[in-house]
Image: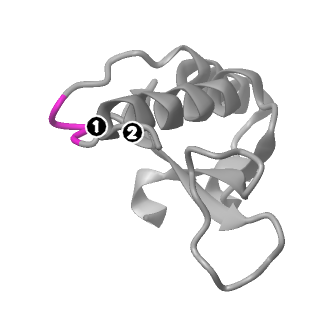
């Protein structure tokens, strides 16, 4: 069993991988983000991929699973949730990618 610090670092690494590459999970756009012009959506996705300003205020658990940022004059929230791969109701372990599916939702601040 891994200790809590190593566990959080593993979760952060896996979350960063999804956020930066779009691999090993799903990325969903809210209706508000989906309705933005393509150039604006591209800017939003680029800002999320390059986001690195994690700190104790916006990432208190050190898991890189959520952030609020501004792109142009648009406030964006992105959040990563975890769902059991086998679709059971049981909690799966976000530090074990074989048990969960990561889903990142990107939404306008006003949609949260």
Q: Secondary structure at mark 1?
A: loop
Q: Secondary structure at mark 2?
A: strand
Of circles 1 and 2, which is in front? 1
| C-alpha span from label 1 to label 2 | 8 Å
Residue 106 x %, y % = 60, 48
Residue 103 x %, y % = 68, 53
Q: Is residue 4 left or right of residue 60?
A: right
Q: Is residue 46 above or below residue 30?
A: above
Tell whether label 2 touches label 1 (CB within 8 Å).
Answer: yes
Q: Which residue is mark 2?
A: 67
Q: Earlier in the sequence, mark 1 or mark 2?
A: 1
Can you see residue 35?
no
Residue, far left:
57
Seen at 51% across and 31% down, the residue is: 10
Mark 2: give few (<14), some (14-19) or many (20+) Cα within 10 Å. some
Seen at 31% across and 24% down, the residue is: 54
Seen at 57% across and 73% down, the residue is: 91
- Is 58 contained in the magenta span? yes
Closer to the camera, 27 or 89? 89
Q: Which residue is mark 1?
A: 59
- Is 42 contained in the magenta span? no
Closer to the camera, 110 or 52? 52
The magenta segment is 56-60
Closer to the camera, 37 or 66? 66
- Where does the C terminus fall, quadrant-wise? bottom left
């Amino acid at each position: 069993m891994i200790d809590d610090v190593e566990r959080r670092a593993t979760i952060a690494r896996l979350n960063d991988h999804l956020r930066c590459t779009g691999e090993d999970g799903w990325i969903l756009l809210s209706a508000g983000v989906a309705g933005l012009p393509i150039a604006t959506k591209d800017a939003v996705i680029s800002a999320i991929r390059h986001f690195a300003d994690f700190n104790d205020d916006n990432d208190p658990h050190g898991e890189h699973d959520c952030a609020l940022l501004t792109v142009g004059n648009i406030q964006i929230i992105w959040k990563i949730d975890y769902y059991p791969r086998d679709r059971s109701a049981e909690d799966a372990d976000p530090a074990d990618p074989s048990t969960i599916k990561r889903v990142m939702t990107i939404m306008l601040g006003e949609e949260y």
